[in-house]
Amino acid sequence: MTKIPHAVIIALALRFFSGGLFNGSGQRYVRFVNRASVAGLALGTAALIMVVSVMNGFDRTLQDRLLGVTPHILLSTDANVEGLTDIGIERVEGYLATEALLVSDFGGQLIELQGLPPESPQLDLHRQGLLQGFIGSTADRLSVLMGEPLARRFGLRPGDRVTVALVNIDRQRIEPRLLTLTLTGIYQLGAETDQMLMVTSLNALSKALGSPPLQRLHLEDPMQVDFAAEQARQQGVTVLNTWGLRYGSFFQAVWIEKLLMSFLLSMLVLLSLVSLASGMRIVIQEKLKTIWMLRSLGLSHRDCQLIFLQQGVLLAVTGVLSGTVLGVVCAYSLPTVMAVIESFTGFSIVAGSYFSALPVDVRVEDTGVVVMAAIGVSLFVLVRLVSTMVSRDLHSVTATHNQSSVRQ
């Protein structure tokens, strides 16, 4: 039997693909099912990419805001930082923080009072979110910054006096102390810390507490905090605290939510694959007589399977790639679209949260995972379908043909 060139097989697959998706010969119902399958794959992939991008945006924004005002790793005053190697330290600076009670005529609230050096990059973050006032200079030793929700609750404005109650514990003796500061600036970072964080001079807080500054480590990759802390401990350095102990469970919850949303939306892709499988089943049944005639001309059983497999893969790839382009374009357009909707209707999807706009972060690796997973599952479904359907239906047609020849 003459072997059919592979180019002929590819040409037949392309012909079946174009005829089943665009205008061509065959049943209209087949074209409708194929188009619906491709559209379903495109919409499912696009929705998955958009939701993952939005979840990435929330995750990135929260990391920037929370980890920007939280020490990645906190060490004691006498810790040998220079001896630490291979943990990705970006910078080291002095730091102090204590819990204090904000005292006012409107009541009181437990807050966190941080002491920062004037060259701290965290002050740049507060400067970017500054709403009123200014960032105090090194001469303003008793100046303080406050989050907008906290200032609004106590009716404070720049220039007002702020009284906080500190607790000194010295030789098993508790000594409360009132510290009066001048509010110089009100900021808004759009995070939980806006409601409970106040920032003052490191020297002023160190003098008030009677304790030397600790050492604050900023890592190049904050997500490696557990590894860095463990490496520091192995090198004989005592780690007092890390951001993972404070916010680790929160970011873990964000990751789990992202995973669950991705799983739920992947059901749209699976439903589209069911439609694609149904369409391919109809196509196989419609083309059986054509394939049987080609087999008479030398087409092998494996060649028949390759034709339908390539047709199905082309349909799946068309849907997934179309959905990828649509998803990326829509993801980048989401903040603008939501802003336009809010301007006309007054409705905001992020109303009541720490965000003023919908954050979006389209990551190449996550988009690649979505695309490869969708194509991989499609290929698995198509291989199983073609290997069983073609074998069964071709044998059925062959048996019918043989019975007709015997009768003749």
Image (cartoon, rainbow, N blue to C red):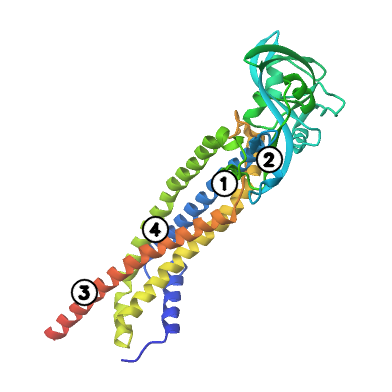
Residue 105's x, y, as percent? 70, 7
Q: CA distance from mark 4 to mark 2?
A: 50 Å
Give the x, y percent position of residue 152.
Answer: 70, 19
Residue sitting nearer the eye, 179 or 385: 179
**In the rendered structure, which disc, 1 or 2, sits on the residue that comes first in sequence?**
2
Q: How far is disc 1 from disc 4 in space, using C-alphas?
A: 41 Å
Residue in the picture at 53% in, 51% down: 49
Residue farthest toward the right in the current orientation of the protein: 139
Compared across the picture, whether 43 is left or right of 77 comes to left
For badge 3, the amino acid type reads Ser
Given this view, does label 4 or label 3 mark the residue nearer the observer?
Answer: 4
Name the residue type under label 2: Leu
Query: Looking at the rendered structure, which numbered label has been put on residue 217?
Result: 2
Instruction: Please give the residue where the numbered disc 4 appears in the rendered image.
Output: 273
Label located before the other in sequence (3 or 2) = 2
SS state under label 1: helix
Task: For marks 4 and 3, give the CA distance.
Answer: 26 Å
Q: Secondary structure at mark 4?
A: helix
Check contact, mark 1 vs mark 4: CB within 8 A: no
Going 62% across and 40% down the picture, which residue do you hit? 237
* Residue pointed to by mark 3: 396
Residue designated by label 1:
227
Amino acid type shown at disc 1: Phe
